[in-house]
């Protein structure tokens, strides 16, 4: 079974926000809201401190609390790929999923439903890369099936050190950051 992940090379990210702008345009994200964003964080310990620049979004968690708490089934896991999606027509805007997400990845769209990164599901269905991946000028974003050992994401995870965000939350995030 396919498992879609993103592998992001923090050593190549320059924080240019092109991924944010591409997502806004591709997904018609309403003004003032974001499906992805840039975080800058100092990591490591002196004297090997490093500024990590990260392009963040929904982690498409393998154990997603946002899905488990949803009272209507609007939040769900789409197969193949394990992508976490929301069906707007089923969402009642109760915000249970916003409270359950440890990554603050969701917002309520002005039309009344929970919204967030979809891994650009319509583009994936056409065999295209997600918009943020396609536009990144330093090619630091990689999207693919981690169950395929020949896929670039699998190769990168094998050959480089990486981390996920808030592993202690037990959500098993599917966005991996190369360090
Ligand atoms: Fe759900 Fe948040 Fe995980 Fe995305 S990052 S799958 S919204 S818990
Ligand atoms: Fe489900 Fe919508 Fe409530 Fe989120 S806001 S838990 S998607 S009904
Ligand atoms: Fe936005 Fe698509 Fe990138 Fe998700 S995968 S952050 S929806 S452009």
Image (cartoon, rainbow, N blue to C red):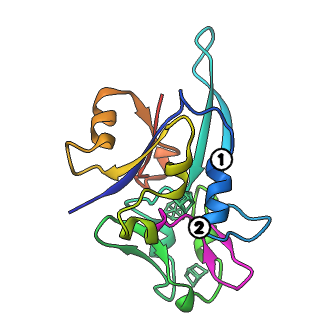
Where is residue 37 shown, x and y percent of the image? 66, 50
Residue at x 59%, y 67% (from the top left corner): 116
Question: Assess mark 2: CB under 8 A from ligand 1?
Answer: yes
Q: Secondary structure at mark 2?
A: loop
Where is residue 86 shown, x and y percent of the image? 51, 78
Q: Is residue 78 magenta?
A: no
Residue 116 is marked as 2
Circle 2/circle 1 CB separation < 8 Å: no
Q: Residues within 10 Å of mark 1 (few under 14, many from 20)?
A: some
Residue 10 vertical placement versus 66 (above, below): above
- List the residue tagged with mark 1: 18
Residue at x 69%, y 85% (from the top left corner): 112
Is residue 75 left or right of 5 when viewed as pictured? right
Q: Earlier in the sequence, mark 2 or mark 1?
A: 1
Residue at x 46%, y 45% (from the top left corner): 167
**Name of the residue lying farthest toward the right:** 32
Q: Which residues are magenta?
A: 106-120
**Name of the residue lying farthest toward the top:** 47
């Amino acid at each position: 079974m396919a498992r879609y992940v993103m592998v992001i090379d923090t050593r190549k990210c320059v924080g240019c926000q092109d991924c944010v702008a591409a997502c806004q345009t591709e997904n018609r994200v309403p003004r003032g809201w974001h499906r992805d964003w840039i975080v800058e964080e100092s990591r490591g310990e002196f004297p090997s401190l490093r500024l990590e620049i990260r392009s963040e979004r929904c982690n498409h968690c393998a154990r997603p609390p946002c899905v488990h708490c949803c009272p209507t089934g609007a939040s769900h896991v789409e197969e193949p790929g394990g992508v976490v999606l929301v069906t707007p027509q089923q969402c009642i805007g109760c915000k249970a999923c916003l409270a359950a997400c440890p990554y603050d990845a969701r917002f309520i769209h002005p039309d009344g439903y929970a919204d967030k990164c979809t891994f650009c599901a319509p583009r994936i269905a056409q065999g295209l890369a997600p918009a943020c991946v396609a536009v990144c000028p330093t090619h630091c974003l990689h999207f693919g099936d981690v169950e395929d050992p020949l896929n670039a994401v699998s190769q990168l995870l094998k050959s480089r050190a990486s981390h996920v965000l808030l592993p202690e939350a037990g959500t098993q995030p599917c966005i991996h950051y190369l360090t």
